[in-house]
Image: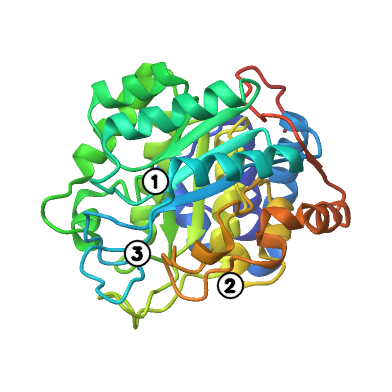
Amino acid sequence: MIDGAKGIENLVDRLAVDHILSREEFCYLLENIRPEQDGYLYEKARKQALASYGNRIFVRGLMEFTNYCKNDCYYCGIRRSNQKASRYRLTPEQVMDCCHTGYGLGFRTFVLQGGEDPWFTDDKIAYLVERIRGGYPDCAITLSVGEKDYDTYKMWFDAGADRYLLRHETANPCHYASLHPPQMSSAHRKECLGNLKKIGYQTGCGIMVGAPYQTTGHIAEDLEYMYGLQPEMVGIGPFIPHHDTPFGDRPAGTLRQTILLLAIVRLMLPGVLLPATTALGTIEPDGREQGVMAGANVVMPNLSPLDVRKKYMLYDNKISTGVEAAANIKELKQRMASIGYEVVTDRGDFRKTLPECV
């Protein structure tokens, strides 16, 4: 039996040393930590992030190059069935223009993110990767374009892609089925993540916090899955509903629960590259800063052309201007400096060997 406030601190201390707890202990921690105890967890996580990467915040230039998608995930604003979505695709020239702008602003990682758009064949995406790799050999290329087979992932890796983001959304198969249409499966998602790791990508998984039907037990299962996968990146953001989806009337996930999980993941995976997401900045103006103070060390400003940013609307009120825009990197640097962090313009690769901080 875990006892009171001291029990919570003991769990946090053990997580900082062992990097894993049992499912029951994760559930207890999430269900019983009180707001006045949050700071103890955040401080441990912040110290681990500082020990791992210093006070450096890595920036990624995000290019949302298509909002067409063949999938019909129940939570997503660009799902196939949303007839009200204003669809677009960027041309290769537009993508290269974004890279040119981003490189001039100091970005050394480019992220190509889009729906699973059949028009962008595997060869077309390989062509985009080759163009970027040829033009910017000193930059990292991250892809986030969904589920593909091993050979496709390998082709893109050989073309020059370094990293791949594929949120697993939930490790529990039944919960996964409640968020996705029948043709999608948790098992296939996990198979894709395993293939990405085998090929050699710096691989990212992640979840939506507060998703419909999510329980604390599901989150504990997610944490256990992440520990087993040992990803180089984890994307965690709050669920935010989109009004033109089946979950449009569901409540959003909370800032606090999201930040608690960021801190737990930092202690569980000390060297992980951990973004303070756009969704955090959407639900709270200083959400990203709060994320950084709890162990996050990556931000992803938007390099997409201004006229399409509001069309990539995965959820309601998604921010796309202000500090979210790549062109406002100066303001982002100022905001991070105000909490003691430095935005740096290097690739920000995952580091395998890191010092311990307990």
Would residue 35 appear left or right of 66 to someone viewing this image?
Answer: right
- Identify which residue, 167 or 18, lies in the foreground: 167
Q: Residue at x 38, y 60 (%)?
A: 88
Numbered disc 2: secondary structure? helix
Residue of label 2: 283
User: Circle 1 sits in a helix, a strand or a loop, which is it?
Assistant: loop
227 relative position to 330: left or right: left
Report how far apart the C-alphas of labels 1 and 2 lie in the structure.
20 Å
Q: Is residue 64 above or below residue 240?
A: above
In the rendered structure, which amino acid carries the disc numbered 1? Arg
Q: Which residue is mark 1?
A: 167
- Residue tagged by mark 3? 87
Q: Dot 2, how many residues are within 10 Å of its Cα: few (below 14), some (14-19), or many (20+)?
A: many
Q: Which mark is residue 148?
A: none
Q: Report, in whole angstroms, how far the alpha carbon at label 3 lies from the one at label 1.
A: 23 Å
Q: Earlier in the sequence, mark 3 or mark 2?
A: 3
Q: Residues within 10 Å of mark 1 (few under 14, many from 20)?
A: many
Q: Residue at x 55, y 21 (%)?
A: 134
Query: Residue at the location (63% across, 36% down)?
Result: 16
Mark 3, secondary structure of its residue: loop
Q: Nearer the viewer, mark 3 or mark 1?
A: 3
Mark 1 vs 2, N-terminal side = 1
Q: Please state if 308 lies on the left or on the right of 73 as rendered.
A: right
Q: Label 3 neighbourhood size at 10 Å, few (<14), some (14-19), many (20+)?
A: some
Residue at the limit of the structure toward the front, as seen here: 93
Residue type, numbered disc 3: Arg
The foreground one among 192 and 217 is 192
Q: Are marks 1 and 2 in contact (CB under 8 Å)?
A: no
Alpha carbon separation for disc pair 3 and 2: 25 Å
Q: Position of residue 349 (x, y in %)?
A: 63, 26
